Image (cartoon, grey):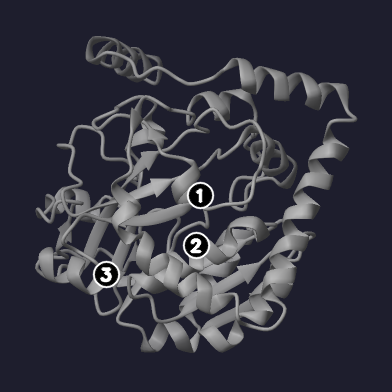
Amino acid sequence: MSTLRDEGPHLLEWIAHHRSIGVDDFLLFSNDCSDGTDAMLDALAPFGVVHLRNAPAPGKSLQWSAFKAAWDHPLRKRATHILGIDSDEFVNLRPPLASLADLIQAANDPDAIVLPWRLFGHNGRARLEPGLTTEQFTRAAPAGCAYPVTSLQFKTFFRVGGPFRQIGVHRPRLKGKATGARWADGSGNLLPEGFAIAEQRINLFGLPEASALAQLNHYSVRSAESFMVKRARGLPNRKGKAIDLTYWVERNFNTVEDTSIAHLGAGLGKVLDQLLTLPGLAALQAAALDWHHRKFAELMRDPVEVKLFGRLLLSAGSVPLPEAAVRELVALYQASHV
């Protein structure tokens, strides 16, 4: 389940990747698209994609409105498991795992599996080019990167039959004060019950790094050009949060090479070829790419946007902080919030 706006250049790869690892149905909500993403979603109906246009009441969150609608939808009611993620997030299963069913079995069928984020940077790419996200952006934050806290966030793959009442941005909402739910980390180890019931906790700070079974590749910046268009679009759940140089610096890690998702590429490619045989989809994808280039050109007529684009290029990659600096920053943050 996901909410999307102007994701046309990357949409088919994202769907193909997740279908190749076992997703049966996609419940996707579009929000006021300009690049043809909504038309692409309609064209994907023969492929098990259910598309709903999201039109919440004025002042209501686009994402939370979609979450509530998704929970009441027949697809949710007949599903066994749910994963609510964004279209810049790709589930990365470790070999020999090749499907979500493999992941469930390897983790001993818990109620929820935490998929830890791995932040991927722009890999030195200034401009949006045709090609696969998973092949173009292979530089990431190192394992165990603990600052900023964004690097320790996660999404949750959870069982519909578990003690949950709603999809959430990072984790499902619990039924009342439900206890006893079995939550596993990205290595399949059971997490403490304190974590399971801490509904507001959306980071893994203080817990061991765990991604032996799975991680969630998070391509939140992609190229500098794509970032500028994303900035113009805004975020679905945080209208007040700026997409600016701070956002870029906190996510643009190019420290280490991570090609661990490549073993899933053959399956992705096979499904992508099938998608492109659906009437009109190839043309719609090409038109979306063209729209993004034209939108960027429009932005570059504004000197403020040009300055930011230049600063993105100057900020070539963020440097992970040493452990001592992280501890000091955490202590300062805690002291400032007393």
Whether residue 56 can be seen here: no
Amino acid type, callout 2: Trp
Mark 2 vs 3, N-terminal side:
2
Which residue is rendered at x = 46% and y = 77% of the image? Answer: 71
Mark 1 or 2, closer to the camera? 1
Looking at the rendered structure, which numbered label has been put on residue 14? 2
Q: Under tag 1, what secondary structure?
A: helix
Residue at the limit of the structure toward the right, as seen here: 301
Q: Which residue is mark 1?
A: 133
Whole-percent x and y of residue 246? 57, 24
Task: Name the disc covering residue 224, or none.
Answer: none
Labels 3 and 1 touching (C-beta < 8 A): no
Classify residue 37 by image quadrant: bottom right
What amino acid is found at the position of numbered circle 1 in the picture?
A: Thr
Residue 197 coordinates in the image, percent (x, y): 23, 55
Residue 153: image quadrant is top left
Q: Earlier in the sequence, mark 3 or mark 1?
A: 3
* Mark earlier in primary sequence (1, 2): 2
Which of the pair 86/143 is nearer the observer?
A: 143
Q: Which is closer to the viewer, label 3 or label 1?
A: 1
Task: Categorize mark 2 by other alpha carbons within 10 Å: few (<14), some (14-19), many (20+).
Answer: many
In the rendered structure, which amino acid carries the disc numbered 3? Leu
**148 and 277: which one is in front?**
277
Q: Is residue 309 above or below residue 116?
A: above
Residue 30 against residue 297 in the figure, above or below: below
Numbered label attached to residue 100:
3
